[in-house]
Image: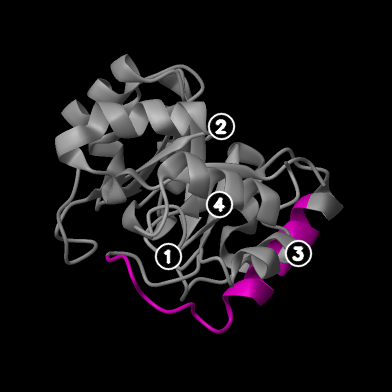
Amino acid sequence: MSAVRISPSMMCADFLHLADDLEALQAGGADYLHVDIMDGRYVPNFTLGPDFCKALARGSRLPLDIHLMVENPEHHAPSFAVGPGSVVSIHPETTRHPLRTLELIRSLGVRAGIAIDPAMTIASVAEMLPYVSLACVMTVNPGYAGQKLVPTALAKVRELAELVKARGLDVEIEVDGNVSWENIPRMVQAGAQVLVAGSSSLFDGKGGLVENLRRLRTLIGSE
């Protein structure tokens, strides 16, 4: 399996000292910056917006991993297509024609991805996989940090990894939700290639970001 990548959840960053956090994440070897976009409709929460993403793209060399938890993402995707190498992921159930929306995202010069809600099966998104660069398995219900791992999540990661391999697809498999020190080894073993690291690991407040990134790298065997 290719090296496991780390995508720090910017919702957990210190907004009063964001430049310091960005410097630490780059110095510590983060691979992406994960940005949760919530509209208060698809999920009962509001978070970040396009101006925040543009500021990250200006202030960091890292590609953005933008997770649109919004209804009708085809209306919003153009505002978030920022930064070279970035990926914009949608929840397929939030748009009437998901393949058309994925095509729109690619036409904007960024990579397209899908996020798979805990209630959705791998079979329900199988025909979309040839059109994406990343598939994110939600290992908690979308909307809030600090939730417990959904019991069926790891089996779903394993099923997705087997399907991607069997079809010979070039799709990164991401996990998002309760990516904790305890769960990370099991997630990687199941086939996860990108870890959205938030409050239960990287931003746990018990160590600095560089220190915790080093601990993460050691845990996944890439340091």
The disc placed on residue 20 is none
The residue located at (18%, 50%) in the rendering is 47
Q: Quadrant of residue 16?
A: top left
Label 3 neighbour load within 10 Å: few <14, some 14-19, many 20+ = some
Mark 4: amino acid: Leu
Nearest the eye: 43 or 98: 43
Q: x, y percentage for residue 190?
A: 73, 66
Nearest the eye: 100 or 164: 164
CB contact under 8 Å: marks 4 and 1: no
CB contact under 8 Å: marks 4 and 3: no
- Along the polypeptide, which appears first: circle 2 or circle 1? 2
Q: x, y percentage for residue 27?
A: 49, 27
Find numbered disc 1 in the image and state the secondary structure of the residue it sits on. Answer: loop
142, above or below 13, in the image = below
Find numbered disc 4 in the image and state the secondary structure of the residue it sits on. Answer: strand
Residue 57 at least partly seen:
yes
The disc placed on residue 195 is 4
The disc placed on residue 29 is 2
- Along the polypeptide, which appears first: circle 3 or circle 1? 3
The disc placed on residue 200 is 1
Residues under labels 4 and 3: Cα distance?
Answer: 12 Å
- Along the polypeptide, which appears first: circle 2 or circle 3? 2
Residues under labels 2 and 4: Cα distance?
Answer: 13 Å
- Along the polypeptide, which appears first: circle 4 or circle 3? 3
Magenta-colored span: 144-164
Residue 165 appears left or right of 137: right
Q: x, y percentage for residue 68?
A: 33, 46
The disc placed on residue 189 is 3
91, above or below 54, in the image = below
Q: Is residue 200 a member of the stretch shown in magenta?
A: no
- Along the polypeptide, which appears first: circle 2 or circle 4? 2
Residues under labels 4 and 1: Cα distance?
Answer: 12 Å
